[in-house]
Amino acid sequence: MRNAKTLEYGFSNEEFEIRVERAQELLYENKLDALLTTIPANLRYFAGIDTHFWESPTRPWFLVIPLSSDPIAVIPEIGEKLFRKTFIKDIYTWPSPNLKGDDVTPLKSILETLPNRFGSIGAELGKEMSIRMPALDFGLLQDNFNFDIVDGSPLIWALRTVKSFNEIKKIEKVAQIVSEVFAQLPTVISTDDSERDVANIVKIEILKRGADNVPYLPVVSGVGGVSQIIGNPTNKLISTGDFLFIDTGATFDGYFCDFDRNFIVGTAPDELKRANEILWHATEEGIKNLVPGAKTKDIWKKINKKIEDFGFMIQGDGRYGHGVGLQLTEPPSISSFDNTIIQENMVLTIEPSLEYKPGKLIVHEENIFVSKDGPVLLTKRAPKELPSIS
């Protein structure tokens, strides 16, 4: 997996065709006549379409995968030439934004031409999915429609949670880039820097090494620990005694890595050292149990047991990891309530957390792909001891 420096962008048409064929097999198994996708990650997965134009919410884009025919793109006119670069051949456009009407009638017209075998079309209605069109337009689509629109997200996740070799290589590339940046960070930041300075240094170094984007970058610091781990960086200067938490969701060719690293400015207090060591071992426990056939909730239990062995009680039902890929977080959840069976070629995070004293939180996280022989780290493993910043 270490030939990432020569990694090319995109995928072959054959890989996209395989994805569509697998989707059609699942459509038949689930008695669906088509799959309707609208969100950027799904259009990228099935068609390879990528554009910063997603930042504009004005126009909906639709990709339809029928049960037994080629995919159909139903898109605004502005996107036609871009879509012509993909393997999709059936492309229908309309002038959008449609100030005199709605943006869903063209889609409805196309869907009503499809063979109606089962009477249902799957859409992005379930967990960790959303429909990227106005709710009023979605209502219009369902009015006097020949099909029932039902949840197709389990089908989509069945495909996307198991990665191809090329997908895994992209995740590994960006994970290795970010690992290198984290490893050298103590030598390039100091107490003269603010959280915002640290975030900018991290982002610039990640991009210089070949990543495409860093959409997610919380930087949080506090004396002896932090109380939250999702806040944006501030102008607060890091200072001696601060615990520094940095989480990073960076991408290469649309694929995310997602992991954090922890640092101490100066010398860590004993309670923080111990909490860090506990989570390092808890992370090891999660990694070694991430094997084909394991259940996510059983992995969660084993991580919790390891934390309990060090004298801490279970701290709720929060998850200890998740899938990662075209989105920062994907199913499954490594949690007490998720019964997913781990499969070969899944890519997941192991992410235990611990509130080691009131209001003081620490998190460890690594990215792993599941090979037939067991877990393979895509990140460079965090050190057992907290790296120190002088």
Image: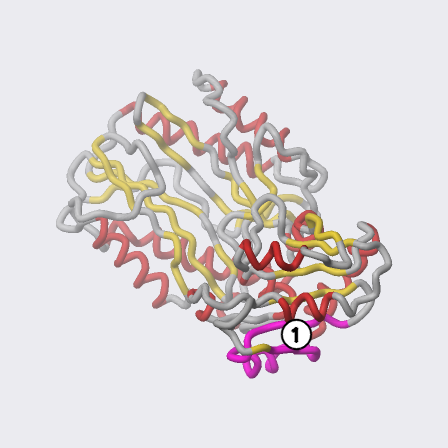
Residue 282, position as x, y percentages in the image: 49, 30
Q: Which residue is mark 1?
A: 12
- The residue sitting at 57% across, 32% down in the picture is 335
> Residue 358 colored magenta?
no
Q: Quadrant of the C terminus?
A: top left
> The residue tagged with tag 1: helix, strand or loop?
loop
**Amino acid type of the residue that numbered disc 1 sits on in the rendered structure:** Ser
In the picture as drawn, the residue positioned furthest to the right comes out as 117
In this rendering, does residue 158 appear at all? no
Q: Nearer the viewer, residue 344 or 105?
A: 105
Residue 89 painted magenta: yes
Q: Based on the displayed image, in which of its 4 quarters is residue 289 positioned?
A: top right
Magenta-highlighted residues: 70-93
Q: Is residue 261 left or right of residue 125?
A: left
Which of these two is toward me, 355 or 93? 93
Name the residue: 70% across, 70% down.
109
Q: Going by the image, does 346 lie left or right of 71?
A: left
